[in-house]
C-alpha cells in the first residue's frame, strides 16, 4: 500500500508478544487501511489484519483491547490497540 500525505502511519515496536513490530496506516477519518505484523503466529495475524482493515480505529480498540495470550498480560491484538492509540495521537 502506498502511504499518502493525508494518511497517518506508524511502525510500533511491540512489547511482551512473539511479534516484534506492527506497521499500521489509517486515513484521515480514522479508517484502517493497512496492518502488518513482523513475527508472531503468521496465520492468526494475517486473519487479524484482514479483519481490521477497513474498520474504524475506535471500533477495533473497543473489540480487541485487553485480550491476553496465555499467561501474558498482553497479546498481539492488544498490542495492535496500543499502536492504534499512538497513531490517533499523531
Image: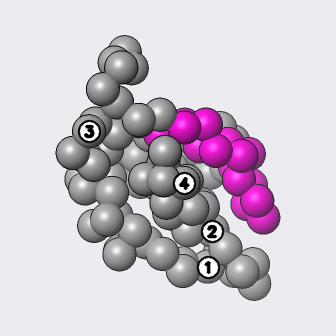
Q: Secondary structure at mark 2?
A: loop
Is residue 72 in view? yes
- Distance from label 4 to label 3 (Cα)? 15 Å
Cβ atoms at labels 4 and 2 below 8 Å apart: no
Q: Dot 1, how many residues are within 10 Å of its Cα: few (below 14), some (14-19), or many (20+)?
A: some
Q: Is residue 20 magenta?
A: yes
- Distance from label 4 to label 2 (Cα)? 17 Å
Question: Which span is picked out in magenta?
Answer: 10-25
The relative height of residue 48 versus residue 75 in the rendered view (above or below) is above
Name the front one of labels 1 and 3: 3
Q: Which residue is mark 2?
A: 75
Q: Is residue 64 magenta?
A: no
Name the front one of labels 1 and 4: 4
Kindly identify the residue that appears in the image at 40 percent across and 46 percent down. Answer: 49
Kindly identify the residue that appears in the image at 76 percent across and 59 percent down. Answer: 15
Is residue 71 shown left or right of residue 45? right
Name the front one of labels 4 and 2: 4
- Distance from label 3 to label 2 (Cα)? 27 Å
Q: Which residue is mark 1?
A: 68
- Distance from label 1 to label 2 (Cα)? 5 Å
Q: Position of residue 90 (x, y in %)?
A: 49, 45
The relative height of residue 73 versus residue 58 in the rendered view (above or below) is below
Q: Which residue is mark 3?
A: 28
Cβ atoms at labels 1 and 4 below 8 Å apart: no
Q: Which residue is mark 4?
A: 86
Q: Secondary structure at mark 3?
A: loop
The relative height of residue 77 versus residue 65 in the rendered view (above or below) is above
Amino acid at each position: 500500500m502506498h502511504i499518502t500525505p493525508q494518511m497517518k502511519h506508524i511502525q510500533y515496536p511491540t512489547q511482551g508478544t512473539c511479534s516484534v513490530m506492527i506497521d499500521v496506516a489509517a486515513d484521515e477519518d480514522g479508517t484502517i487501511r493497512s496492518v502488518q505484523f513482523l513475527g508472531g503466529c503468521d496465520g492468526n495475524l494475517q486473519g487479524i489484519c484482514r479483519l481490521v482493515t477497513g474498520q474504524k480505529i475506535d471500533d477495533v480498540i473497543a473489540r480487541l483491547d485487553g485480550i491476553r495470550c496465555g499467561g501474558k498480560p498482553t497479546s498481539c491484538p492488544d498490542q495492535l490497540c496500543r499502536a492504534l492509540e499512538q497513531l490517533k495521537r499523531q
